[in-house]
Structure formats: structure tokens, C-alpha cells
Image: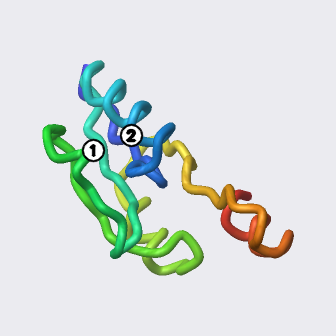
Amino acid sequence: MDAMATLVTGATGLLGSHVTRRLVERGDEVRTHVRAESPVEALNDLDVELCRGDILDRRSVRRALCGVDRGFHLAGLTGLRAAAANHFRVNV
């Protein structure tokens, strides 16, 4: 059976980095969608494809999704200062 191609958004965050690590450990081919300014040290020792972009940019998300079998949307806003509409746009 071929490895599943999996996209993880928010792979540099706490939850995203742990899910990414587990997916790699079980043999998935993992592509990560992370912001250009996000530090990627948590992913340095993993065999993943880095796809830089913004979750609010439809084109970057479409590029990241190209050729994947499934995705885990773990990007999100957690700060309380952002407007509710911004939380919805990013988190949903």
C-alpha cells in the first residue's frame, strides 16, 4: 500500500507539530502549509515538504492541497484580541 499524502496546516504550532510528527512516524508523506514568517525548527528533523503560504490566501491553500489525499486543518488564531470574524476566517 502506498503512503498517504497528507497536508497539515499550522504544522509549526504546538498541536500541529505533534500531529505532523505522528503522521511522519506512521509513514505518511507529509506536506506542511506554514506562514512565511513561522519558525520551522520544530520540523527540522522531520522528512516533510514545507509549503509556505497564508491560510487566508486561496491560491496558496490550493497549491498546498494539490496531490494530497487528506488534510488536517490545525492552523488557528488563539489570541483574544482578534475580532470574532478573523477567528472564524482562520479557524474555520
Query: Identity of the amino acid at label 2?
Result: Ser
- Residue 88, x across and y down, in percent: 79, 65
Name the residue nearer the viewer: 61 or 4.
61
Q: Is residue 68 above or below residue 59?
A: above
Q: Which colour style is shown?
A: rainbow
Q: Secondary structure at mark 1?
A: helix
Q: Secondary structure at mark 2?
A: helix
Residue depicted at 39% across the width and 60% down the height: 33
Residue marked by disc 1: 42
Q: Earlier in the sequence, mark 1 or mark 2?
A: 2
Q: Are the residues tagged 1 and 2 within 8 Å (C-beta)?
A: yes
Query: In the picture, residue 3 is in which quadrant?
Result: top left
Identify the image quadrant of the N terminus.
top left
Residue marked by disc 2: 17
Query: In the picture, residue 67 is in which quadrant?
Result: bottom left
Query: Identity of the amino acid at label 1?
Result: Ala
- Residue 61, x across and y down, in percent: 48, 69
Callout 1: few (<14), some (14-19), or many (20+) C-alpha neighbours within 10 Å?
A: some
Q: How many marks?
A: 2
Q: Is residue 35 above or below residue 32?
A: below
71 sits left or right of 27 in the view: right
18 sits left or right of 81 in the view: left
Residue depicted at 16% across the width and 46% down the height: 44
